[in-house]
């Protein structure tokens, strides 16, 4: 059953890639807006892209799962879906609790707390799938969450982006490669032909 779920997750690696890029770019955009002196027009475009990327990832994920509903899903696959749905609800509840307690949202505190909850979901996902790279990525995410708690908000954004790269994007590419090696070999041939 684990092998069947791992095979399914390998094909679902596209979702890890999609969310990895969406969240990496979202946090990187926030960092770059504060760290670099950019023209107002560029800042406006980047601020527009910030909420659009996660929204597009969410819409694609819904479409993907509705398309996959026709196929048989395993207990492990359903468990993973519930873990990530619960993660989203936990992030919303964390925001509400922070606002209720502090009477404002303290983003310097919010991001490390979000990262801890995400790290937990990543580690649990890796344990269920018995995929060590995801487990290690989740542990790194948690360590970076602690480091973020020591830094100002702008630098937290950079570490948050790095955490998504390490914990989600890299394992997603590896899983997707394992399920589609011919796709990547074709891309490598095209790159070699260019040079």
Image (cartoon, helix red, strand yellow):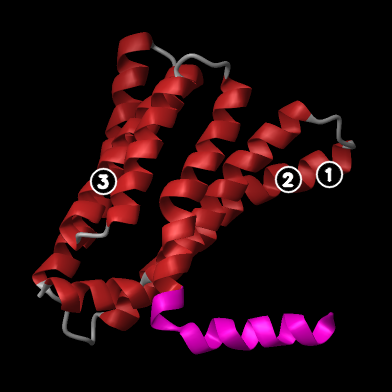
Marks 2 and 1: in contact by CB < 8 Å? yes
Q: What segment is highlighted magenta in the picture? A: 177-195
Element at badge 1? helix
Asked if residue 105 shows in the view, the reply is: no
Q: Position of residue 137 (x, y in %)?
A: 37, 46
In this view, the residue in front, 82 or 193, is 193
> Pointer 3: what residue?
123
Asked if residue 165 shows in the view, the reply is: yes
> Pointer 1: what residue?
42
Q: Quadrant location of residue 5?
A: bottom left
At label 2, counting other C-alpha atoms closer than 10 Å, the crowd grade (few under 14, some 14-19, many 20 or more) is: some
Element at badge 3? helix
Element at badge 2? helix
> Pointer 2: what residue?
46
Q: Where is residue 177 in the image (x, y as percent from the top left)?
A: 46, 75
Which is the main secondary structure of the residues drawn in magenta?
A: helix
In this view, the residue in front, 24 or 55, is 24
Q: Quadrant location of residue 190?
A: bottom right
In this view, the residue in front, 182 or 148, is 182
């Amino acid at each position: 059953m684990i092998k069947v779920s791992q095979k399914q997750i390998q094909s679902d690696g596209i979702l890890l890639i999609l969310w990895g890029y969406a969240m990496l770019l979202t946090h990187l955009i926030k960092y770059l807006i504060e760290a670099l002196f950019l023209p107002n027009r560029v800042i406006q475009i980047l601020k527009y892209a910030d909420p659009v990327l996660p929204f597009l990832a969410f819409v694609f994920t819904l479409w993907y799962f509705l398309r996959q509903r026709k196929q048989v899903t395993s207990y492990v696959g359903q468990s993973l879906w519930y873990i990530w749905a619960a993660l989203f609800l936990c992030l919303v509840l964390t925001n509400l609790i922070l606002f209720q307690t502090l009477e404002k949202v303290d983003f310097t505190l919010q991001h490390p707390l979000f990262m801890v909850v995400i790290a937990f979901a990543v580690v649990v996902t890796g344990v269920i799938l018995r995929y060590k790279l995801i487990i290690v990525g989740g542990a790194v995410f948690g360590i970076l969450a602690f480091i973020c708690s020591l830094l100002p908000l702008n630098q937290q954004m950079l570490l948050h982006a790095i955490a998504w790269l390490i914990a989600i994007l890299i394992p997603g590419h590896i899983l997707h490669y394992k399920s589609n090696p011919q796709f990547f070999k074709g891309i490598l041939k095209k790159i070699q032909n260019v040079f």
